[in-house]
Image (cartoon, helix red, strand yellow):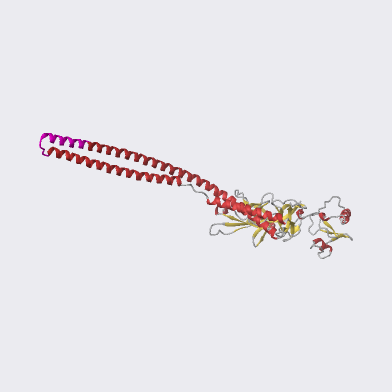
Amino acid sequence: MKNDCLFCAIIDGEIPSKKMYEDEQCYAFYDIEPQAPVHFLVVPKAHICCANAITADNSGVVAHCFEVIAKICRELGVESYRIVNNCGDQAGQTVKAGDTLAVFDAAEVDRAVNAKRAALQQARTQAAQQTAGDTADPYAAQLAQQQLERAYEETHRIYADGEESVSRAQTKRDEAAAALEKARNAGYADDAEKQAAVENAAAALEAAEDALYSAQKAAEDANNAALSAAQSAEDNRNTALHTLEKEQETTEKQNALDRAAAAVTASDAETLQAELDALLAVQQAGGTLTAPSDGTLVSLDLVVGQPSPAVGGQLAADADFTAEIPLEESQANLVSVGTVLHLSQSRASCDAAVQSLSAPDENGTVTAKCTLSKGAWCAGAANASATVQGEKRPCVLPASAVHKDNTGCYVLAIEQKATILGQQNIVVSLPVTVVETGDTTAAVSGALDADTQVIVSSTRAAQAGDRVKIHDAS
């Protein structure tokens, strides 16, 4: 046996098989899980993994295999048939975890890692900036408030200065009036001297009154000018505050948009992180891409010597995937066991029936569980949706079609799935709720509709995952 080859093990007898034909160059045997009425394999005894390994040295062996195929078909009376050769991993070959799928140029992997790190850092920085948001600049409003306060201070100073100036002028006028009165009442040597003294005192009083009037007028004008300046400063302050309020509203709206964008950017960063992790795994493996789990390669879109695409292929896991969907209380009220959900992830999608619902947690969240059909699923987030319609009428089935195990009641149905060998009938298990039972029938509700092909009877025991043929009961 070479390279743990399954066919080499069969040829060597390490794995049992039902032989059809054998000679020195090849071995023919029936397929253990036939997908057609006549389904057999012809393999060369020399290890040739696929058509890519055909050379001038071994092409004769391959030609002989085709001769044997024609010979067997003639003996079986088969005139029309199809020949399939899985050539390369992307042709549906089964792989195990750790199997090498491709080898990349180490320098190119290093460059890809550095570029992905830079993109991730940029996305994280952008998300942080979008989350932090912005604030309106209050400087203009603060400056206007300071100018208003200075205007108020200047108004008080001017008023005080005017009061002081008027007070001094008033004192001088009062002193002049007292001097005039004294001159009128004083004794003089003659009338001429008295008249002269009175006239001088009267002139001094008139000058003091003019000075008082001027001081009052100057104080009034200064007060009015200061009040006008203060009013202008207050108007400017109010305008600045209104402008700041509008800027704050605009900024908050933009911040809300940025926070929404940050969620998208953060999601992009998570995708970039996953891509970086995958690249780092390839880098640490020296440029080798290995299968992350056992499964069948649905596709592998890699070409030797060409840059690889973002998604190099799809690996369908052999094991079923279970989806856990958290439901808020309002959503949980619309979902029950048997409700069909549509789930999608990347290039995989399917409809699956709810198999169980958990009790509400402390936040009222209920978890619904579904088993997904085989496909290119991977661990991680997926989208789930359901169309909730009006109440469905129970479906009446023969009682023999309803089964029960430790998880509850279910029926077995048939789904058609596309494989590399064409359409196949696969048995699936659908949870149901028994509404009512009779002597020979049962009314059930669940993930059933008019197109569901429920297995009522079978020639042998069937279980989920089996490949079956449909016999017309008529």
Q: Nearer the viewer, residue 464 or 396?
A: 464
Q: Is residue 187 magenta?
A: yes
Corner quadrant of residue 24: bottom right
Question: What secondary structure predominates along the stretch shown in magenta?
Answer: helix
Q: Would residue 320 be found to the left or right of residue 75 on screen?
A: left
Image point 27% across, 44% down: which residue? 164
Reply above or below: 428 against 227.
below
Q: Looking at the picture, how far across and down is residue 261, in whole percent?
A: 57, 48
Say whether residue 271 is visible. Answer: no
Q: Looking at the picture, how far across and down is residue 182, in whole percent?
A: 14, 40
Report the label total: 0
Reply above or below: 234 against 409.
above
Q: Would residue 303 be found to the left or right of residue 76 on screen?
A: left
Bounds of the magenta span? 186-206
Q: Looking at the picture, how far across and down is residue 112, in whole percent?
A: 68, 54
Q: Looking at the picture, how far across and down is residue 450, in whole percent?
A: 68, 49
Q: Residue furthest bottom?
A: 14
Say whether residue 140 is visible. Answer: yes
Image point 37% across, 40% down: which residue? 229
Quadrant where the N terminus sits is: bottom right
